[in-house]
């Protein structure tokens, strides 16, 4: 447990929608966040399609701890600490691969991919060594929901089903873009590093106020390509799209009531769309092609699952804090399994247009994060997150507001404060 004494109310004024600038810059607070949030609640870590076959693995980290996500011969996905039980050297160096065993290159101890210690070099020098007690340690809690792998370092954490709550409905809808076919992480992961606090990305994922300004160049180019002044009304201050608090810090931007259902409207700005559709017509009926294209674009919403998962467009976004002023964000676009190549070509072109490192959206957001990082060094003590507070609409456990309101950010900070003040 962190020895840093922290009161969340020193950093947030939820009643007035204010956040103190030091909430983004205080190293001691960051240390407390790692202990009270990232070491205690559920974290997204992988998609099951990243380890589809027995022996497949990927190396990653959980709250700064190196781990191996691996599928065993029994088909079960395990998450093992990437740490030899002898002298703590990591036992797997590759980012991904397939292996039946992991061997520590420091002193040669060998483990099955299920974690059991099976080989100790020069064992006669040990008087008593119970190998059954020295396997690679598993994380205390590992659960899957719709092929999303979640873990927790806290053995007493609530069930994943309870943690996800209302967010499950939208995870289901995100998965439904496969139109009955599984989604697969077939195109790898891009990793974007920025010099700023992890909560900049947390807040940004469901920020419906910024796109028409931070991403103005994108809308200008799209207008030139399509001949229209805009690509949908949800940016307009009078639009009917919503922002939602789903409870437990999970938030949503819901643009479905402003989006077109016809694939041509969604894809027409993509390169080579006409040629790709012409090829698809050779393989599929018009009805099947339209159904696949209509169901395999963006689901029409941005979802944040507190604290580190965002489902946006066609991709999974994982937030990884590195330090108080450094963050890495992983973007993993998903393909639809078992469809003609043209479907996934269009999906990837659509993803790259906005979310690749050279796309329109990611560089814009990164620049805004940089500017905020500079700005919080000024003398202004408080940041304002009160937009739309007077027009929130509670509906049971869910609260809705206009898409440009800062309800999602207030909801995320409320959950942050709840966890930070929990000393259990």
Image (cartoon, rainbow, N blue to C red):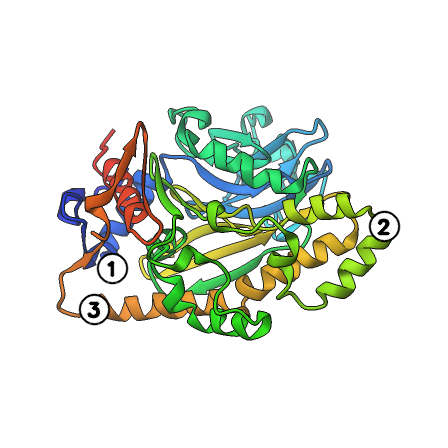
Viewer-proximal residue among 275 and 346: 275
Say whether marks 3 and 1 touch (CB < 8 Å): yes
Viewer-proximal residue among 214 and 56: 214
Position of the C terminus, as image quadrant, is: top left
Q: Name the residue tied to disc 1.
A: 25
Q: CA distance from mark 3 to mark 1?
A: 9 Å
Position of the N terminus, as image quadrant, is: top left
Q: Name the residue tied to disc 2.
A: 283
Q: Name the residue tied to disc 3.
A: 377
User: Which mark lies nearer to you, 3 or 2?
Assistant: 2
Within 10 Å of disc 1 (Cα), the crowding (few <14, some 14-19, many 20+) is some
Q: Secondary structure at mark 2?
A: helix
- The spot of residue 373 in percent (x, y) is 29, 67
- The spot of residue 283 in percent (x, y) is 85, 50
Left or right of residue 290, residue 189 in this image: left
Sequence order check, earlier mark of 3 and 2: 2
- The spot of residue 215 in percent (x, y) is 43, 68
């Amino acid at each position: 447990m962190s020895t840093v004494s922290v009161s969340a109310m020193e950093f947030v004024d939820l009643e007035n929608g204010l956040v103190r600038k030091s909430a983004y810059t205080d190293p001691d607070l960051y240390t407390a966040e790692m202990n009270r949030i990232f070491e205690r609640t559920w974290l997204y870590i992988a998609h099951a399609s990243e380890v589809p076959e027995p022996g497949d693995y990927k190396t990653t980290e959980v709250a700064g701890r190196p781990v191996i996500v691996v599928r065993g011969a029994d088909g079960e996905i395990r998450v093992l600490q990437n740490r030899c039980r002898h002298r703590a050297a990591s036992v797997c160096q590759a980012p991904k691969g397939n292996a039946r065993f992991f061997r520590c290159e420091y002193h040669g101890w060998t483990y099955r991919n299920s974690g059991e210690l099976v080989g100790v070099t020069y064992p006669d020098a040990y008087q008593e060594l119970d190998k059954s007690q020295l396997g690679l340690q598993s994380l205390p809690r590992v659960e899957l929901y719709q092929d999303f792998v979640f873990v927790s370092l806290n053995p007493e954490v609530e069930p994943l089903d309870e943690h996800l709550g209302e967010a499950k409905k939208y995870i289901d809808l995100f998965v439904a873009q496969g139109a009955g076919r599984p989604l697969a992480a077939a195109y790898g992961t891009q990793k974007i590093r920025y010099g700023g606090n992890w909560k900049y990305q947390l807040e940004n994922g469901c920020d419906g106020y910024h796109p028409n300004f931070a991403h103005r160049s994108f809308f200008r180019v799209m207008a030139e390509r399509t001949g229209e002044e805009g690509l949908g009304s949800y940016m307009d201050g009078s639009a009917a799209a919503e922002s939602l608090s789903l409870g437990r810090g999970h938030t949503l931007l819901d643009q479905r009531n402003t989006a077109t259902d016809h694939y041509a409207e969604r894809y027409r700005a993509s390169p080579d769309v006409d040629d790709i559709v012409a090829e698809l017509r050779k393989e599929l009926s018009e009805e099947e092609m339209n159904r696949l294209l209509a169901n395999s674009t963006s689901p029409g919403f941005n979802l944040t699952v507190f604290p580190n998962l965002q489902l946006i467009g066609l991709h999974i976004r994982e937030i990884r804090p590195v330090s108080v002023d450094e963050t890495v964000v992983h973007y993993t676009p998903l393909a639809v399994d078992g469809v003609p190549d043209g479907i996934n070509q269009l999906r990837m072109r659509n993803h790259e247009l906005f979310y690749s490192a050279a796309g329109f959206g990611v560089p814009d957001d990164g620049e805004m994060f940089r500017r905020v990082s500079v700005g919080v060094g000024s003398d202004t003590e408080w940041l304002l997150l009160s937009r739309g507070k007077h027009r929130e609409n509670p509906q049971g456990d869910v609260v809705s507001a206009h898409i440009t309101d800062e309800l999602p950010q207030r909801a995320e900070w409320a959950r942050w404060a709840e966890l930070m003040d929990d000393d259990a």
